[in-house]
Amino acid sequence: MQLRPMRALVVDDEPIARQILIDELEGLLEVELAGDSANGNQALLKIAKLKPDLMFLDSQMPVMGGFEVIQNLQDDVPVVVIVTAFDQHAIRAFEAGAVGYLLKPVTPARLKTSVARAQRLRERPHDAAENMALQSDRDVVWIILARQRLLSTCSLQELERRLEGSQFRRGHRNAIVNINSVDFMVSNLK
């Protein structure tokens, strides 16, 4: 079953960066441009009016930045991909609920990957919210904390390599767990 294209809103205070992203998105069949905004205040109004499925949001804008836009979202929250020239805000982006983090200039391959992630979340919102634990779902890796879940930009194999020597261990082919957080374990092996 073919899903309708995801309706996207592009929010960036830099006109050239905004237009480049719009041009790239218009080349993707999975995306239909719902609109664009030059600032956070305008973005909130357009989100309420247009109800986009997906939003590409610049993190650094005058008056109201991308993270403030996320904090002010009410109902019909779109899937958010942060687009920025700054690599130091990635963790904050995922803590805020973004499913992607694209560095400018955005490459077509990374843009397609972000759109694909957003589509998977739209197709299976309950599966995405359930059954998680620093888990891999095909090429999507979820980092599950006590009160929130974050989407990783790394593969599970890359995370395992980075966490080597720490309290994290591979518990399954699609899961890494913090062994300090394990209360008990049951094995089906005899």
Image (tube, rainbow, N blue to C red):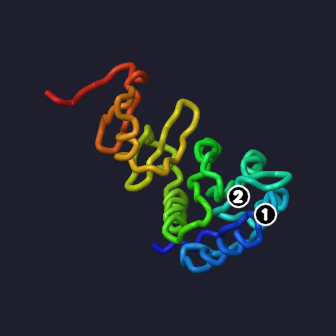
- Label 1 is placed on what type of residue? Asp
| x 64%, y 52%: residue | 86
| x 51%, y 64%: residue | 110
> Which label's residue is closer to the chain start, 1 or 2?
1
Question: Does 69 sit left or right of 184 as displayed?
Answer: right
Q: CA distance from mark 1 to mark 2?
A: 8 Å
| x 63%, y 46%: residue | 89
Question: Does 116 sit left or right of 136 as displayed?
Answer: right
Task: Report the quarter where the C terminus lies.
Answer: top left
How far across and how far down the image is residue 149, in percent?
A: 54, 40
Which sits in the foreground, 88 or 24?
Answer: 88
Q: Element at badge 2? A: strand
Q: Quadrant of residue 58?
A: bottom right
From this view, report whether residue 111 is shown above or below residue 152: below
From this view, report whether residue 119 is shown above or below residue 91: below
How far across and how far down the image is residue 47, in percent?
A: 76, 61
- Label 2 is placed on what type of residue? Asp
How far across and how far down the image is residue 108, in percent?
A: 53, 71
Query: Neighbour class for label 1 at 10 Å: few (<14), some, many (≥20)?
Result: some
Which sits in the foreground, 57 or 44?
Answer: 57
How far across and how far down the image is residue 162, in percent?
A: 40, 39
Q: Which residue is mark 1?
A: 13
From this view, report whether residue 109 is shown above or below residue 159: below
Pointer 1 and pointer 2: residues touching (CB < 8 Å)? yes
Q: Element at badge 1? A: loop
Residue 58, disc: 2
Query: Neighbour class for label 2 at 10 Å: few (<14), some, many (≥20)?
Result: many
Which sits in the foreground, 150 or 132?
Answer: 150
Question: Does 142 sit left or right of 40 as displayed?
Answer: left
Q: Quadrant of residue 62?
A: bottom right
